[in-house]
C-alpha cells in the first residue's frame, strides 16, 4: 500500500476560535491579491464586450439594452 503524502490536517477548515498569526494573515492577503486582480480584469473585459453588442445580439443572450447599460455603468470592483 502506498503511503499517503497528502497533509490533511493542513487543509482542514479553521474553527471560529482558531487565530492566525499576523504573518499568516498577511501571507493569505498577498496570495489573494492576484486572484482579485484577475477577477477585476475579467469584469472589465466582459463589460467592454457587452457594450459592443448590438441590440439583436443582446436579445439573443436574453439581456435588454437597459440591463446591459446598467451592468456597464458599474465600477469594476462591484459584482
Image (cartoon, rainbow, N blue to C red):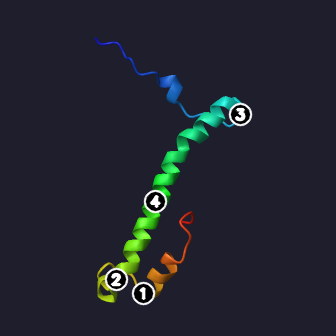
Q: Position of residue 8 (x, y in %)?
A: 47, 24
Res 65 label: 1
The answer to the question of whether label 1 and label 2 lie on touching residues, with beta carbons closer than 8 A, is: yes
Residue behind mark 2? 58
Q: Residue at x 56, y 63 (%)?
A: 77
Residue sitting nearer the eye, 58 or 11:
58
**Classed neighbour count for the residue bearing mark 3: other residues with Cα under 10 Å, few (<14), some (14–19), many (≥20):** few
* Residue located at (43% from left, 60% from top): 42
Would you say residue 18 is visible in this rendering?
A: no
Q: Earlier in the sequence, mark 2 or mark 4?
A: 4
Q: What is the C-alpha distance between the residues marked 4 and 1?
A: 23 Å
- Label 4 to label 3: alpha-carbon separation: 35 Å
- Marks 1 and 2, how far apart at CA: 7 Å
> Where residue 47 sits in the image (x, y, percent)?
43, 72
* Lower position in the chain sequence, tag 3 or tag 1: 3
Per the image, label 1 sits on a secondary structure element best described as helix
Could you tell which of marks 4 and 3 lies nearer the N-terminus? 3
* Location of mark 3 (residue): 17
Cα separation, mark 2 vs mark 3, equals: 48 Å
Q: Mark 4 = which residue?
A: 41
Amino acid at each position: 500500500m502506498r503511503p499517503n503524502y497528502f497533509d490533511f490536517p493542513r487543509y482542514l477548515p479553521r474553527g471560529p476560535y482558531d487565530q492566525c498569526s499576523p504573518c499568516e494573515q498577511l501571507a493569505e492577503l498577498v496570495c489573494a491579491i492576484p486572484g482579485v486582480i484577475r477577477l477585476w480584469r475579467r469584469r472589465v473585459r466582459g463589460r467592454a464586450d457587452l457594450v459592443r453588442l448590438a441590440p439583436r445580439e443582446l436579445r439573443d443572450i436574453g439581456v435588454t439594452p437597459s440591463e446591459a447599460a446598467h451592468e456597464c455603468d458599474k465600477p469594476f470592483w462591484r459584482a
